[in-house]
Image (cartoon, rainbow, N blue to C red):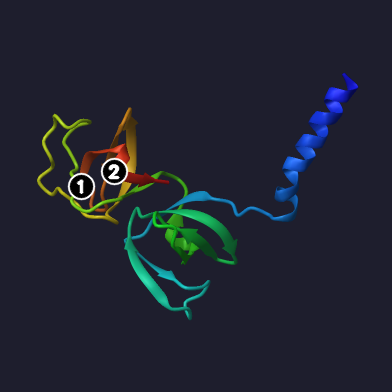
């Protein structure tokens, strides 16, 4: 019994070493909570603006520095965004491909919405997940359904 415990402890210790010496960045979900947000090269307004995104754009929070978050998008690109422009109170999603249909119900048997299709980087708030379909809402309050495989959810 003592031998088995010792071997398990040594194995656990060896597997834990990389986490002790190479701290991992956390990856928390964040959503843009304002009408627009500027994404920057560094943590401050004096850094170059790289991209302007709209409400409900999702990101993975990698790190916090003062009042700025270092975030990663669906393409694994890294940006900085001010904390007051974000929330973690709900889930958000972004379209992964151009010409993606949003539908009136959860399935391809439902008609596309009149304002569909939408293009890559169209951001949405997640309302409900029903098997392989997600009910979403855009920045002006229009609702629809999209296949889970066509979006990146945070």
Residue sitting nearer the eye, 55 or 123 = 123
Q: Is 70 rendered above or below residue 143?
A: below
Q: Which residue is mark 1?
A: 100
Q: Nearer the N terminus, badge 2 or badge 1? A: 1
Crowding around mark 2 (Cα neighbors within 10 Å: few <14, some 14 to 19, many 20+) is some
Residue 145 image position (x, y, % from top left): 23, 37
Residue occupying image coordinates x 72% and y 41%? 15
Determine whether the residue tagged by mark 1 lies in a helix, strand or loop. Answer: loop
Residue occupying image coordinates x 71% and y 50%? 18
Residue 41 image position (x, y, % from top left): 47, 73
Q: Are marks 2 and 1 in contact (CB under 8 Å)?
A: yes
Q: Is 99 rendered above or below residue 109?
A: below
Residue occupying image coordinates x 84% and y 25%? 5
**Spatial CA span between label 2 and label 1:** 7 Å
Task: Name the residue furthest top.
Answer: 1
Determine whether the residue tagged by mark 2 lies in a helix, strand or loop. Answer: helix
Q: Seen in the image, is 61 located left or right of residue 152? A: right
Residue 39 image position (x, y, % from top left): 41, 68
Residue sitting nearer the eye, 67 or 1 = 1
Q: Which residue is mark 2?
A: 150
Q: Is 114 rendered above or below residue 122?
A: above
Residue sitting nearer the eye, 93 or 44 = 93
Residue 76 image position (x, y, % from top left): 44, 58
Task: Name the residue furthest bottom.
Answer: 46
Task: Name the residue furthest right.
Answer: 2
């Amino acid at each position: 019994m003592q031998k088995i415990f010792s071997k398990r402890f040594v194995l656990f210790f060896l597997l834990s070493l990389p986490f002790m010496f190479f701290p991992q960045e956390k990856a928390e979900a964040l959503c843009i909570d304002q009408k627009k947000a500027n994404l920057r090269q560094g943590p401050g307004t004096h850094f170059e603006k790289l991209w302007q995104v709209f409400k409900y754009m999702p990101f993975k929070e990698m790190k916090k520095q003062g009042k700025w978050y270092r975030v990663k998008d669906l393409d694994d690109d890294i940006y900085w965004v001010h904390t007051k422009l974000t929330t973690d109170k709900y889930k958000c999603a972004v379209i992964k491909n151009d010409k993606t249909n949003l539908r009136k119900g959860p399935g391809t048997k439902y008609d596309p919405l009149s304002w569909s299709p939408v293009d890559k980087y169209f951001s949405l708030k997640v309302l409900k997940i029903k098997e392989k379909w997600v009910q979403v809402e855009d920045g002006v309050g229009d609702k629809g359904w999209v296949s889970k495989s066509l979006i990146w959810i945070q």
